[in-house]
Amino acid sequence: MPATILVVDDEKNIQLTLSRALSMEGYVVEAASGGREALEKIAALPVDAVVMDVRMPDLDGLAVLQRARETRPDLPVVIMSGHGSIDTVRSAFKLGAFDYLEKPITERDKLLVAVKNALALRSLREENAELRREAGRLDMIGGGPAMQRLFELVRRAAPSEGRVLVTGENGTGKELVARALHESSRRKSGPFVKLNCAAVPADLIESELFGHERGAFTGAVAARRGKFELADGGTLFLDEVGDMPAAMQAKVLRVLQEGEFERVGGAHTLKVDVRVVAATNKDLPAEVQAGRFREDLYYRLNVVPVHAPPLRERKEDIPALATHFLAEACERNGRRPMRLERDALAALQAHEWPGNVRELRNLLERLAILCDGPAIGADDVAAMLPGVRRPRTERFRAGASFHDLVEEAEREIILGALDAHADNVSETARDLGLERSHLYKKMRALGVKRGGDAP
């Protein structure tokens, strides 16, 4: 089926010329004479790409681009302008434009190449999304020993019907493990339903899990199916299961044992076929010992234990994760592709990541949004990640002697201190805890010829 291209321009002759050129190449062409009409057509029609002027009387192209990206982030937009400044071009790319063409478009091939490339990008994005859905691992990226052990456990456990208990700190990707188990199982065509047990008030969790009948309690104006019912034939992911109220633990245990339950306020017993995958960041054996978690429920859930390792235990995976998250963030936020310099990757690997993969992903999105250049260095990382340690290899240089490296470090320290004290040697010496005469000697030995009161 030929692709549909939307041409947006308030000048009818340009609109007609572009539409004719695209139609001759076999595309289905729709046209709009203004920004508002363009947004209406983007919402109503199966548009595959947009070629749009910037200057229009009712709503300019940049505003249309921004609104279109909110509802159709996958839609490639080629911007045109006969009055384009550098700021206009930069703004267009920041908002997510795929390409920019200068008007008048005298060379038909430039238009056709831009549209062809835009459609190829859209096709590639769709293909990548499909591959990721089929892969099962989703964002479970890593080639180190810890992740290889995790992948092997998922591979072995997924085809079975055994319940899985995923343990690990916050931000380690426990939900991704649960999704990978589902996507690689015989239930993958069924639903994947999740419930965060810590996020639901104690008086509502029974209704969330088992549903309720109309009139079962105040506010129950209609019957509602619960998570167990919705997950019939698929997988139910119980996140933060260690926070489940004690009274509810007994009712969940019954469903796991017998595969049946009643809705809140209901009299009919419902049977379901559900595989339960649970996750927790708590030490459940300790919770059992303290009487806060049922021992029999723990053993029912913990048929196959799977541990999601913290990021500090698999730092060898950080370069691959960071590169993936940066590319993802650039695409999602309409930024040009960026790259991480070697010293930036070393700085990321030097950090301990108490927030694990979630913290790393958030940082890379922050870097993608706030950094200007195409390259991200260690200084950019340090500016946005307080407390980050500079990599130990930063001062080392192959072939340089220890004496030379120490002298370079001392020179940088003294120059930095002089900068901080406006070249006042006396104040610099006091701040560094040195005698002024000793600092003078150091400066002479290191070739530092600065300082307002230097000899």
Image (cartoon, rainbow, N blue to C red):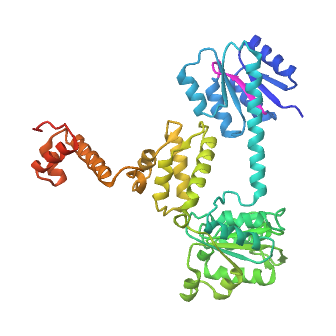
Q: Which residue is located at x 12 percent, y 50 percent?
A: 438
Residue 108 vertical placement versus 374 (above, below) = above
Give the side of residue 275 with respect to residue 335, left or right.
Answer: right
Residue 53 is inside the magenta segment: yes
Q: Where residue 162 appears, x then y in whole percent?
A: 77, 78
Q: Where residue 170 appears, x then y in whole percent?
A: 55, 66
Looking at the image, how many numbered discs can be counted on the residues? 0
Seen from the viewer's position, the closer of residues 389 and 36 is: 389
Give the side of residue 365 with respect to residue 426, left or right.
Answer: right
Q: Which residue is located at x 58 percent, y 47 percent?
A: 326
Q: Which residue is located at x 62 percent, y 68 percent?
A: 145
Q: Where residue 363 appears, x then y in whole percent?
A: 51, 51
Give the side of residue 175 with respect to residue 184, left or right.
Answer: left
Q: Image quadrant of residue 120? A: top right
Image quarter in which the N terminus is found: top right
| Image: magenta residue range | 48-58
The residue sitting at the right extreme is: 1
Q: Which residue is located at x 54 percent, y 22 percent?
A: 86
Seen from the viewer's position, the closer of residues 321 and 397 is: 397
Image quarter in which the C terminus is found: top left
Residue 451 vertical placement versus 430 (above, below) = above
Q: Where residue 343 appears, x then y in whole percent?
A: 47, 48
Whether residue 337 is visible, yes or no, is: yes
Residue 281 is inside the magenta segment: no
Residue 402 vertical placement versus 374 (above, below) = below
